[in-house]
Amino acid sequence: MGSAIPSITDAESQVMTVLWDQAPRSSEEIVAALADTGWHEKTIRTLLNRLLGKQAVAADRDGRRYLYRPLLSREQWQSQESRSLLDRVFGGRVAPLLAHFSRHEKLSEKDIAELRALIDAIDRKER
Amino acid sequence: MGSAIPSITDAESQVMTVLWDQAPRSSEEIVAALADTGWHEKTIRTLLNRLLGKQAVAADRDGRRYLYRPLLSREQWQSQESRSLLDRVFGGRVAPLLAHFSRHEKLSEKDIAELRALIDAIDRKER
DNA sequence: ATTTGAAGATTACGCTCGTAATCCTTTGCC
DNA sequence: GGCAAAGGATTACGAGCGTAATCTTCAAAT
């Protein structure tokens, strides 16, 4: 039985983002990096502990403190969240999702060019 | 002050789906349509009441019972959820989302053709 | 008129989440 | 060697959620 992919909450994901940007980091550094959230230091420590419990991060002792690093990767997390949206909201199919964006999101020309390039790349890769 | 867009939970969205497929419907019909969930009838009634409280559905009296119909549209809900994913997980940009799918989801040729058609359509509309 | 039964309304209950406060421990300082 | 401070661990607490059970009401049947 391996480790199931931990599902993390919104607040937790903001802590993960700090570690995805750079790791390992001490809690003090993490707190500093999250100054703009207005969260209390205690709050952030709680979130770190919950992430430890979920095995989304690991803590390595460094003298009297810990250095934290992510176990769950940003890619894994993006996958989970994307798949969840796809399944819950769009019946598991990608095209309706993009169709939705095409109707309701403003896509820049750059976006469109990027999408087209992506599709070409996918197409080439697939065959 | 208009009505803010109600945010509904996962379980609630399954009830909404029944009404999006067809409305208006009595609670009895809704319960029947959700038989595959294994939910107790009481559970479904609770969800209906919560949706009423959130003004995501309306109930019109019909004799001794109510007929329910959606106030929140499926499109509105899909918009909310998509935007939420985009902002929370992909920094608000569409291309990284599709890039993600290109790497991690298996897209069929049909998918790809569909996407290409969509992009062409978007492109034509945009300019 | 009394009972019963269906539909809806109210209340419940344990869990997770956001948001901390409090408690404990280890270590440097005087 | 005793004490304060930093860091971590434990506990808290209300709101929302999944999941119902209980209570109320009104109409239909007897």
Image (cartoon, coloured by chain):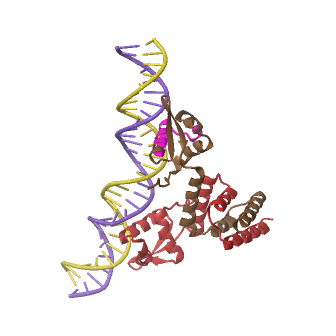
Chain colours: A red, B brown, C purple, D yellow
Q: Position of residue A51 (x, y in %)?
A: 46, 65
Residue B79 shows up from this direction: yes
Which of A65/B64 is in front?
B64
Q: Which quadrant of the view contains residue B92?
A: bottom right
Q: Position of residue B82 (x, y in %)?
A: 58, 60
Q: Is residue A103 magenta?
A: no
Residue A1 shows up from this direction: no
- Horizontal side of A89 relative to A46 (left or right) equals right
Q: Residue at x 50, y 64 (%)?
A: A55
Q: Position of residue B126 (x, y in %)?
A: 69, 67
In this rendering, the answer to whether B50 lies above or below B64 is below
Magenta region: B34-51
In this rendering, the answer to whether A69 lies above or below D26 is below
| Quadrant into which the C terminus of chain A falls | bottom right
Q: Residue at x 78, y 66 (%)?
A: A123
- Horizontal side of A26 relative to B105 (left or right) equals left
- Horizontal side of A127 relative to B19 (left or right) equals right
